Amino acid sequence: MKVMTGRDALLDILEDEGIDHIFGNPGTTELPLMDALVERPNLNYVLALQESVGMAMADGFSRASGKLCAANFHVAPGLGNALGAIYNAKFIGSPVLVTAGQRDHGHGLTEPLLGGNLVEMAKPVVKWATEVEQVQDLPIVMRRAAKLALTPPTGPVFVSLPRDVLLDSAEMELGSPTRLVSGSRPADEVLERLAERLLASENPVIISAQEVCFEDALAELGEVSELIGAPVYTQTVPCLAMFPSDHPHFMGELGKAPAKVRALLDSYDMAFMVGGDGLRFSAPFPGGPLPPGMPLIQLGLEDWALGKNYPSELAIKAGVKETLRALIPVLEAKRNDHQADAVQARSARIRSNNWSVACAEFMSKTEGLSVSKPIMADYLMMQIAKELPEDAVVVEEALTSSANLLKMLPVKDNRRFYGLASGGIGWAVAGAIGVQLAQPDRPVVAVIGDGSSMYSIQALWTAAHLNLPIKFIIANNRSYSILKGRVINLPNSASRAKQQIIGMDFNNPELDFPAMARSMGVNSYQVSEPDDIVPAIRKAMAEDGPVLLDVLIHDGYQSADF
Ligand SMILES: Cc1ncc(C[n+]2csc(CCOP(=O)(O)OP(=O)(O)O)c2C)c(N)n1
Ligand SMILES: [Mg+2]
């Protein structure tokens, strides 16, 4: 066994676990690591100018690559700043190994500056949180952490690293990575039961949830939908590319309004929910979105999501892609002529009002907004949807402005789209940086609300520093439009009665996005005329480095129903 310092052992293990990016913001307790990184050209340290920004970058990187990355922050205030962004990563299951420097053992008793119980702080928002007690424990702790982060349901883990542990030396065996094989298919009898149940339904509906994206099971789910004659909706939080938009059975998003989802599901006699909990909402809804007594069949790797809020008639814990692939021949073999005829009839109905049909209608209506000034958000989204190349990756956090983006954006592959997931805003400016680092060969375009962008605007500096070719499009309505729409709809709203809204406008003074962008080294243009949108997008796309387009849009608001 070799004698090594804690910091060398840690960095050796990170490299051995396949990590090549560390997103972070350093302080004194991290200096042993920062110093050692000088000798580690394979570990790219990405400097974020605030911890929540660094964490959102890490989340974006892991979300868009499925790969483990590391994030490193500075004791209690640094970790505290990152917590909201760690929450977001946990919500969507991004495998990030989060670490923070900690005071030397024993030093905490004196209540030093920046000290705190890091493990207790991190616990509610990670899969596992621990502190390293002694240098000899580093290998087992770090190996466990990496394995856990990547084991479905994937997610962030936290390790607190006392400074003395990093500086200490000991004889250590570093071990090697463990990866669980977990994407397995169910037994033959279960597949047969599933096939029989799906074929017995006279009007089934499929809800595609996040694991379908992560496992790239879009094509398999498409085949199953055709075999059973079911329309496919994507989950209520449309934060990923979970189905190809041009598939004839695609109907679009379920939407975020529980009452509408309930009304929509009412017309079916069975729901097949694939790949996680596809029915998450922000607003409460008595009785839930599933019609009473509606049979639910679930398939996914995360057992917590199965039968969680609604009883599941058949709940199968298994890998989505493998299971669907194995299901296809069973459905083909079991389907009788009567069922095949019924499937054909349903399929014809679905095709007559699918996503493509609705998209064409919505676009032709939206074309009518070409003369509206100020620019209407739907018109901006339509131009983005039409203008972006097929391989562009869209990062989205534009709330009211992007409400209809996915009605128009063609989605062909599972890495096309990463949107706001948990509801915790401030993800996208930074998240886009992680996404671009994870997918360096694809253009990344981030569409972000002005309000949301301000939570992590300093991420622009990192984009400029790394010369990442991300195009940031700010939907600038000088307000928190979504909240204004909601506050006026409160019962007996004083805001509505007095025509006065508190704390949701930031138009005095107006935020100067081009100046902010330029101050951080990002080129920027402002767009205020509808006709200038397309030329501006083209110009931005043609530039090598990052560009921010500040698009001034209508500041109106309406009752938000999500
Ligand atoms: C971390 C966090 N803080 C606050 C909120 C509450 N919130 C939800 S949407 C929103 C405003 C978003 O504004 P903007 O991005 O400009 O979009 P718009 O509503 O104007 O379309 C706020 C403050 C939140 N969801 N998450
Ligand atoms: Mg806004």
Image (cartoon, rainbow, N blue to C red):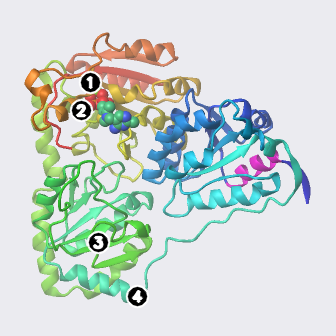
* Figure quadrant of residue 462: top right
Q: Is residue 16 magenta?
A: yes
- Residue shown at 12%/70% (left/top)? 346
Q: Nearer the viewer, residue 107 or 387?
A: 107
Q: Residues within 10 Å of mark 1 (few under 14, many from 20)?
A: some
Disc 1 C-beta below 8 A from ligand 1: yes
Sequence order check: which comes first, mark 4 or mark 3?
Answer: 4
Check disc 1 and report its element: helix, strand or loop.
loop
Residue underneath mark 4: 188
State which region is magenta: 6-17
Q: Is residue 169 visible?
A: yes
Sequence order check: which comes first, mark 2 or mark 4?
Answer: 4
Three-letter amino acid code of the residue under disc 3: Val
Above or below 437: residue 239? below
Residue underneath mark 3: 224
- Residue shown at 26%/63% (left/top)? 207
Location of residue 68 in the rendering, given as x and y in whole percent from the top left corner = 59, 52
Sequence order check: which comes first, mark 1 or mark 3?
Answer: 3
Q: Nearer the viewer, mark 4 or mark 3?
A: 4
Residue underneath mark 1: 504
Q: Nearer the viewer, mark 2 or mark 4?
A: 2
Q: Is mark 2 in CB contact (under 8 Å) with mark 4?
A: no
Check the picture and name the quadrant holding the N terminus: bottom right
Q: Nearer the viewer, residue 126 or 228?
A: 126
Check the picture and name the quadrant holding the C terminus: top left
Q: Which mark is residue 483?
A: 2
